[in-house]
Amino acid sequence: MYKTLKAWANKLSFAVKLISYSRVKTLVRLLITESPGAVIARAKRFWQLKRYQKLGGTPPQSWNDSEDNVCPDLIVSDVSEFEVTLPLNIPTFDDIEVSIIVPVYNQWDYTVRCIHSIIENVEGVSFEVIVADDCSTDETINAQRHLPNAKIVRPEENQGFLKNCNFAAKHAVGDFIVLLNNDTVVHEHWLSSLLSTIKRDDDIGIVGSKLVYPDGTLQEAGGIVWRDGSAWNYGNGRNPSLPEYNYYKEVDYISGASVLIRATCWHQLEGFDTRYAPAYYEDTDFCFALRDLGYKTVFQPQSVVTHFEGKSHGTNTASGLKAYQVTNQKKFREKWHNILRTEHSANGQGGFVARDRSRNKKSILLIDHYVPWYDQDAGSRSTFMYVKFFVDAGYNVKFIGDNFYPHQPYTQVLESMGVEVLYGGHYAENWRGWFLEHQSFIDVVYFHRPHIAPKYLPFIKQHSAAKLVYQCHDLHHWRLARAAEISSCEKTKQEAQHWKGVELDIFDSVDVGLTFSHDEKAYLDALNLKSDIQQVPLFVYDKPSSPDSQLPFAKRQDLLFVGGFGHAPNEEGVLWFLESVWPLVQQRLPDICFHIVGSKMPDAIKAYGSDTVIIHGFVSDEELATLYRKVSVNILPLLHGAGVKGKLVESLFYGTPVVSTAIGLEGINAADYGLVASNTPQKFADQVAKLVMNEQDWQRQMSQQQQLFIDNFSRGAVAEHIKRVF
């Protein structure tokens, strides 16, 4: 009874936290405009989404269903329902980084709401607001009184949108210029996400936001330009929370309703091309002109802006200012005829590769059990590193996690790299349809895990000509067979036989089988399997850890173990070390400490915690790097297992000498670099003491390990391996 009451109390508390003034107003409006059943269904989806984000677990089937195009959390009330106290207090800064230009012609109420949203949602950025008043006749003429800290600029006569923007930009002092329509409302992190995006890549000239209609449907997630000069607002009318609209990507153009531009690029092009005056196609043309200079146009989905489209110019292209949309398309097509003919597709064809400018890229689909938890275990770290490698190498990368769950922050990290991650109930049920729709564009399908690949492999093999690659993180049946040998467990032996059949069937069904271990490659080669067996590195690094970050021998102390304890060999090995080796080490090195790092720490190991056995559990990458650099020795006391060990490769990267059993050194030709196995408690303890006490031996092994790293795990070495595979 107590547990039930507590559960309901937690749910009630969670529900109360979701209540806000804007959401209550939205609910009232919906109750007036929609049927009770529709409102209940909408509320249920919203509740599911919030619980889904907070608690995890099985994805609800409806929150991003393609039949429901509304994202309830992005519904914004009409400006008539918005109240604000004037004057607005815009912050002031001595050094301006971003100049936010808001071009206006009348529509004072929208301008006020727009600037109010800027004030509420700009954090950590020094900015100025420039109200570009194109000779308004409403309350905008008194803008300076209501917006005392804004810079109000007015031409002598009405110029139209394009020339008004060009005129206002002459008054901007920031390193970056933002153009923001006055009929918009910006959301949290709107500007900071745009700014961080453009700062991370000098080749980006302009970055734009995800535009959403006030009813919670999508206006645009980047733009596509077709060969005839026509343009698509990609995703228009769909649900903005769907994954295809939430990954960073290069695009043909970004609508000028919310864009951030390098001031140097703006001035180099002298603003918008005036042939498109008074408006329309100037933003598309600007993106093409930037591309002609070697700059990229990119879409940043973390920057979200609600756009009351049509408030400025209407929606009818047959008359009024909107008619210029038709005439300017012709001008645009004539100016960029050669580029459109050679680099763009016929109208509506190949949207899968047109939406992220991947027409000339290889597309690769990776399938794993879930998005890689790169800071939790070696297998996930490896997958993450290869995903990043493929992105950096110019692949168009798509990712399916078998649970179709957007684990955070991991999913958003992939999306921010430019990876489209399929998640949610719709894709869990319809991944086959998604694959059939896009299979002609997918060049490589990259499978992981023996318990995951068989679910997808037969269907994809039947319906695709893509190259099929299976990444063996380690041979599951090898690991189980070794465990069975140690424990004399008949059940484990039978499991090993089962998984041997599964794994060898996978290798016989794909074009290329990859392993991290030369021992596993030799074993697989001897079986005369149908696939081409290749060895690739476990991890991908640009270069070894900088020597400048390393502490010298004299300032190092202690031992370290790193490994996720969801992996059974790690618990077994650490317990063996604590019970059989650690007492011998303490006899010779009584002041030394042993640090144990890893997620899912079992109680059996926690019980050893003391002044000299430091139980860390899960740590961040930064904390782990600090530990690697300050300890004397990293230990790998593994008694069974398979494949190359992530903790070994990390030690090679950081330059921390390793003491290991033969299992720990398996798969990398360690003996060729002078690394020897220590398989008994006494030998293990002797080798630890030798490295901790003798600087010459410690320096020699560190140098040998660094050479092993350069030869086998640097980015250049990986690139050569991948060329052979793809």
Image (tube, grey):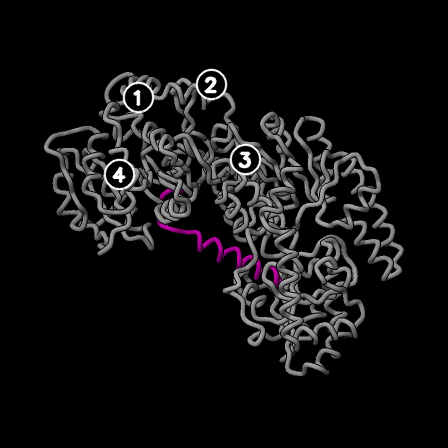
Residue found 48% across the figure and 45% down from its top:
416
Q: CA distance from mark 4 to mark 2?
A: 42 Å
Q: Amino acid at mark 1?
A: Gln
Q: Secondary structure at mark 4?
A: helix
Q: CA distance from mark 1 to mark 2?
A: 20 Å
Picture quadrant of residue 226: top left
Is residue 22 highlighted in magenta? yes
Q: Secondary structure at mark 1?
A: helix
Residue in front for this viewpoint, 609 or 331: 331
Q: Main secondary structure of the magenta part?
A: helix
- Above or below residue 567? Residue 392 is above
Q: CA distance from mark 3 to mark 4?
A: 44 Å
Residue in front for this viewpoint, 351 or 189: 351
Residue found 17% across the figure and 37% down from its top:
133
Q: CA distance from mark 1 to mark 3?
A: 32 Å
Is residue 333 highlighted in magenta? no
The residue tagged 1 is 325
The residue tagged 2 is 346
Q: Amino acid at mark 3?
A: Asn
Residue found 56% across the figure and 70% down from its top:
630
**Quadrant (top left/top right/bottom left/bottom right) for the C terminus:** top right
Q: Secondary structure at mark 2?
A: loop
The residue tagged 3 is 396
Q: Amino acid at mark 2?
A: Ala
**Mark 1, other Cα within 10 Å: few <14 / some 14–19 / many ≥20:** some
Which mark is nearer the camera, 1 or 4? 1
Which mark is nearer the camera, 1 or 3? 3
Residues in magenta, as a range? 1-27
Say whether marks 2 and 3 touch (CB < 8 Å): no
Q: CA distance from mark 2 to mark 3?
A: 20 Å
